């Protein structure tokens, strides 16, 4: 008795399964790498913002000491701290007789300039 073993359909099925698993593994690796890059960017932005907040708190601490001593000048009432593309602008009111003051401005800003996708579009004949 002579039995033939036909591997054609099984081999094709295994090749298809191997290709699918390889594709899924590659997509998983690419997604993981993209997530890592985004997490690192977010960590850098968060660190910059926390450092700016800490410097802003230090500015208020120094201002508080000057206000308590009665030695506040007009230039001491505002500051702009920049770090990593972010800027923290702080402005406080003049201290009253008790040395109390009010924070008038505490703005954390980032300059953002969008790329204009329409800069290369022909705007017509110039006259």
Image (spheres, rainbow, N blue to C red):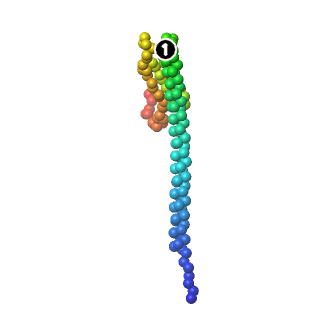
Most foreground residue, 100 or 21: 100
Give whichever of 118, 122 is nearer the camera: 118
Q: Residue at x 51, y 35 (%)?
A: 46
Image quarter (top left, top right, bottom left or bottom right) of the N terminus: bottom right
Q: Is residue 1 visible?
A: yes
Q: Is residue 81 visible?
A: no
Number of numbered tags placed on the structure image = 1
Q: Position of residue 12 (x, y in %)?
A: 53, 69
User: What residue do we see at 53% from left, 49% from top?
Assistant: 32
Closer to the camera in the image, 110 or 44:
44
Give coordinates of residue 125: x percent, y percent.
44, 32
For the C terminus, which image quadrant? top left
Drawn side of residue 34 relative to residue 100, left or right = right
Q: Residue furthest bottom?
A: 1
Residue matched to label 1: 68
Q: Residue furthest right?
A: 2
- Disc 1 element: helix
Q: Position of residue 58 (x, y in %)?
A: 52, 23
Question: Residue at the location (43% across, 11% down)?
Answer: 97
Q: Residues within 10 Å of mark 1 (few under 14, many from 20)?
A: some
């Amino acid at each position: 008795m002579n039995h033939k073993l036909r591997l054609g359909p099984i081999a094709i099925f295994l090749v298809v399964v191997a290709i699918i698993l390889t594709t899924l593994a590659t997509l998983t690796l690419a997604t993981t790498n993209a997530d890592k890059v985004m997490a690192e960017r977010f960590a850098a932005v968060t660190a910059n913002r926390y450092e700016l907040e800490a410097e802003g708190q230090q500015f208020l601490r120094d201002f508080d000491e000057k206000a308590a001593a009665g030695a506040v000048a007009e230039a001491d009432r505002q500051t702009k701290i920049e770090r990593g593309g972010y800027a923290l602008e702080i402005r406080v009111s003049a201290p009253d007789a008790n040395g109390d003051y009010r924070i008038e401005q505490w703005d954390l800003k980032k300059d953002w300039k969008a790329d204009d996708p329409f800069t290369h579009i022909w705007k017509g004949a110039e006259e």
